[in-house]
Image: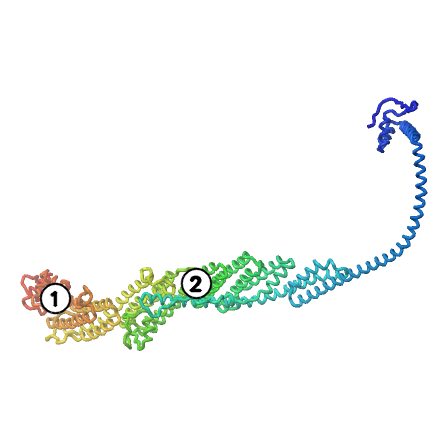
Amino acid sequence: MMSVKGGKRSSVLENGDKVETGMPGIDDSALASAIANGEDLGPFIRAAFESGKPESLVHQLRNFVKKKEVEIEDLCKAHYEEFIHAVDELRYVLVDADELKGGLQEENFKLQEVGNSFLAKLDALIEAHGTKENLVLAIESLRICTTVVDLCLKINEDIMADSYYPALKSLDILERDYLPQIPAKAFRVLLEKQIPICRNHIERRVSAEFNEWLVQIRSIAREVGQLSIDQASSARQREEELRGRQRQAEEQSRSGSREGVYMLEMEDLDDDDSRLKFDLTPVYRAFHINTCLGLDDQFKEYYYKNRQLQMNSDLQALSAQSFLDTYQTYFAQVAGFFIVEDRVLRSAGGLITNARVDSLWETAISRMNVVIEDQFSRIQTARHMLLVKDYVSLMCVTLRRYGFQVGPLLDVLDTMRDKYHELLLNDCRKQVSDVLANDKYEQMVMRKEYEYQINVLMFNLQTADVMPAFPYVAPFSATVPECCRVVKTFVENSVSFLSYGGHMDFFDLVKNYIDKLVINVLNEALLKLIKNPTLGVSHAMQIAANMTVLERACSYFSEHAAKLCGIPMRVVEGPHGALSARAVLRQSQAVAHEQMLKLVKSKVDEFMSLTANINWSPDEPPLSGNEYLNDVTIYLETIAETAQEILPLDAFDKVLRGVLTHISDCIVGTLLSQEVTKFNVLAMMGIDADLKVLESFADDRFQLSGLDKIIGASNLRTCLSEARQLVNLFLATNPELFLNPVIREKQYNALDFRKVLVVAQKYRDLPERFMSPGLPSSLGSWGYSPKCAHLFIL
């Protein structure tokens, strides 16, 4: 380091001379060391100039030079001889060097001569090597260009052959691997322009094919939907056949029969999807090509929007045509659309998502619900509504197989069941009205077995398991089988509408609708008919008999409904399966019986009016009764025979008891009437003869009809008790016994003593024993005996 001090400093040389440094602040040893070491003298110079005395630095440097010269001189003096000797040797070396230089020049000249020939050859070799490299480069360029041209030819061939994916792959290879290597700039620029053009051309060709597919798929989808629905219909028919065979096997098993037992075997059915052939190649190709072009998202959106537009177009109901003419095409189109979409979803590799398909389905199902509700509100026939509902349910079955939720559609169909059944009830009301209007109300005569089967066995109306002899006279008229057919068809249509819907167990619904039909339609029509004032007795009796059979047919109606609904017979046989209509029909039978009895009584009144012609004061008793009784007896025989054939025993009993009681009342009423002012014992004997005939009739019918076998049943002659006891009283030898309460209760319990005395007032031919003294003068003025007076007092 340099030391800086104030003042001047002096140096002493080796010879003793003193040297002034003349520069304050700079150490001579430091400067000498810096010079010896070759260090930078910049700091010393900078310090000199900063101090303002550069002369001192120059002086100091001169001193340093002098000092070194002295050192050199001393060194030379010390090594003078050696130096001289070295110079001599150097002179010898210079001589040798000159000789060597001459030899080197000679050798160099020779080498130059040889090298020139070699350089000429080297230049030729370099030139040949350059030529070779140019040739190799040219060959490589030609190879690349040839390969590129071949690849371009292949691309053109693929495009012409509609092999767009290989063409795109070749374009990618051409652009990625070969285009940077093409040496010809013009050719490379040309290809750079043509590659996008080719890709655009492929994209346009693929889009054109896809657009053409969009046009064609609408008609194809309609055919696909129709075929799928037809397959669902065939499967449903097979299922119903299998169910029918199963029910038949169950019935035979229950009956213990071992003949004809069915073994239910499922057939090996081909996959229905294999028959649904439609080409999705344009879709796959378009999506794949657009994916290769990096346009997959755009194509997905394009596909979705176009299919959405097509669906909206398909869902528009054709207002120009009747819905009943186009509903199959409408629903087949919708079914085919979503079958195609399901296939695209499962096989197109992400072209459309589940969420978008579900969105399309939700839109479609909401639009279809509106269309169905609107069109069903316009349909006014049950048959058309059933046809549309069946087709819609088949479409639902078809689409459910592809995973679509069809519950809302089935719910809409369920909301239409009440309207459908109202229309169906209106149709049945017309049919029942026509059946009742066209019936002659005569017992059906069946001359052949098949007639018996279709009119009796079909509806379980037989009263015995044995086939009757033919011709067979049924207890009902043509109304019964015809109405049963109406109800049977109603049940089948009802089950057909309610089946394959939202309800799995709809037997109760069917049963309720059957009750409505039987109660509100059939029963009301029969009641209206039975209350017709112009109705004859025979017709009324036949209607009452028909009601009895129809009540029994209610079991068949519920059983038939249960079979169609797949309900076990044990359920139907219990209280759960009974129809409420059966009790209503039973009540209506009572009304019919009352009306029939009213008509019979009215007819009897016509015959009993002939009692006005009776001679109540004859001179001789009539030998065979009064003349009116012949007509009454004939009518009673006719009524009894008909009633016994067609009416149940309780109804038959009610009719005969009612008419006999009415005849008894008529006889008593005649005696009580003002038209009969007096009668004698001979007239009473004629009434006695009439009663004997009626009692004989009552006894015969009581025996022949089987009423005597009913426990607790009283004889029919008891219906004539009032008239019989009245006649017995006036023909008795001891009529005063009537005054005895015990005897009166035992022999005359049916008599009202007031009626007895009214009749007794008209009995003019009383014997003297009936007279007694002590009666009021008013009675005595009538000329009555005392006994008659006692009766009058009673």
Sort mark 1 into few (<14), some (14-19) or many (20+) by Cα contacts within 10 Å. many
Asked whether the beta carbons under mark 2 and mark 1 sit within 8 Å of each other, the answer is no
SS at circle 1: helix
Residue 770 visible: yes
* Residue occupying the point 63% across, 61% down: 289
In the displayed structure image, the side of residue 770 where residue 714 appears, left or right: right
* Residue 385 pos. (x, y %): 44, 66
Q: Can you identify the residue that label 1 sits on?
A: 760
In the displayed structure image, the side of residue 644 where residue 415 appears, left or right: right
Q: CA distance from mark 2 to mark 1?
A: 79 Å
SS at circle 2: loop
Closer to the observer: label 2 or label 1? 2
Q: Give 458 or 144, whichever is nearer the viewer.
A: 144
Q: Amino acid at mark 2?
A: Tyr
Q: Can you identify the residue that label 2 sits on?
A: 500
Q: Give 764 or 409, whichever is nearer the viewer.
A: 409
* Residue 541 pos. (x, y %): 27, 70
- As displayed, is residue 406 above or below residue 8? below
